[in-house]
Amino acid sequence: MASYFSSSPEEFGEDILKTNYVHGYDNQEKIRLQDQASTLVELLHSDTSYPAGSRILEAGCGVGAQTITLARNSPGALITSVDISELSLAEAKQKTLDTGLTNVSFEKADIFNLHYGKDAFDHVFLCFVLEHLPAPAEALNALKKVLRKGGTITVIEGDHGSAYFHPDSEAARKAIQCQIELQRRAGGNALIGRELYPLLIKAGYDSVRVSPRMVYVDASRPELVEGFIKRTFTAMIEGVRESALKAGLAKAEDFGKGIQDLYRTAESDGVFCYTFFKAIGIKR
Ligand SMILES: C[S@@+](CC[C@H](N)C(=O)[O-])C[C@H]1O[C@@H](n2cnc3c(N)ncnc32)[C@H](O)[C@@H]1O
């Protein structure tokens, strides 16, 4: 799921961060990704597990928010988790060690320039990565090269156009639009969930199936009110405030009203809906 600009990408000295990658690597972002992951584990991962002995590539593992679940759900699988950010990898590695999981190895790698051989993996998994890439179909193609015939790819993405809520608010919708526009200007696509089927088909995967996973939140689900409406979605939109104002996409008071209205949906009579998309394809 999408994201906000890092406060100081330069400190990481990585070209992709300096150019067109919209994402945060700061503490707040790490916490947000972790909250999001634990809230959504059941919804997104309950049907992902790989057989013992299978070789899994997790592409763009970030700080390991999904890695722990992958490794727990498939204790006998051999997981290789890669990312272009060394800092994120270090964090993911530490987290995995802390949880006592031993079936994951971490490596620095660029999805577009993988150093693995043909057929090196039985399955590929990636989550919230394509939305940041200017060439998502090429990324899926590059991943297909290291996947064996008959192996699967699993892709999970959000789609900010799927957010609707009560009370409805034009200001909230405009604030969300700021995030979508900033991500678009940075070369990404915050509406990519709806495109997973055509993207996987374009990249040559077979038997593609997409399942929409709706997060429905009202006051009867307090953990989602807190974990999803407040700490995941609204925190993410709030995170682009400075960039949105700087880019002239909104006035401070209008953006502030949008954020206020998003928090308003977390009150006792509020409702919030958002849909993730999980796609699975096979390499023939
Ligand atoms: C939004 S984070 C998602 C992390 C993790 N999959 C999760 O769900 O929490 C996207 C990650 O993709 C990584 N990434 C972006 N472009 C990449 C590339 N070309 N090769 C490898 N990793 C990449 C970023 O460094 C970042 O850690």
Image (cartoon, rainbow, N blue to C red):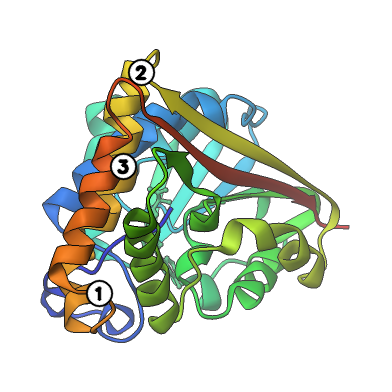
Closer to the camera in the image, 32 or 12: 32
Which quadrant holds residue 250? bottom left
The residue at which mark 1 appears reads as 250
Does residue 249 appear to the left or right of 156 in the view shown? left
Instruction: Examine the rendering and report whether any part of residue 75 can be seen.
Output: no
Q: Residue at x 54, y 38 (%)?
A: 78
Which circle's residue, 3 or 1, is located before the other in the chain?
3
Q: Quadrant of the C terminus?
A: bottom right
One can see residue 275 in this view: yes
Res. 219 mark: 2
Give the residue drawn at x 45%, y 81%: 187
Callout 3 amino acid: Thr
Q: Amino acid at mark 2?
A: Ala
Graded by Cα atoms within 10 Å as few (under 14), some (14 to 19) or many (20 or more), the crowding at tag 2 reads some
**How many discs appear?**
3
Q: Position of residue 17 (x, y in %)?
A: 28, 78
Name the mark nearer the viewer: 2 or 3: 2
Determine the quadrant in which ligand 1 lies: bottom left
x and y percentages locating residue 240 in the rendered image? 23, 65
Disc on the earlier residue, 2 or 3: 2
Residue located farthest toward the top when viewing the structure as drawn = 220
Residue at disc 1, secondary structure: loop
Q: Nearer the viewer, residue 266 or 186?
A: 266
Task: Measure the alpha-carbon separation of dots 2 and 3.
Answer: 16 Å
| Circle 2: element type | loop
Q: Are marks 3 and 1 in contact (CB under 8 Å)?
A: no
Q: Which residue is mark 3?
A: 232
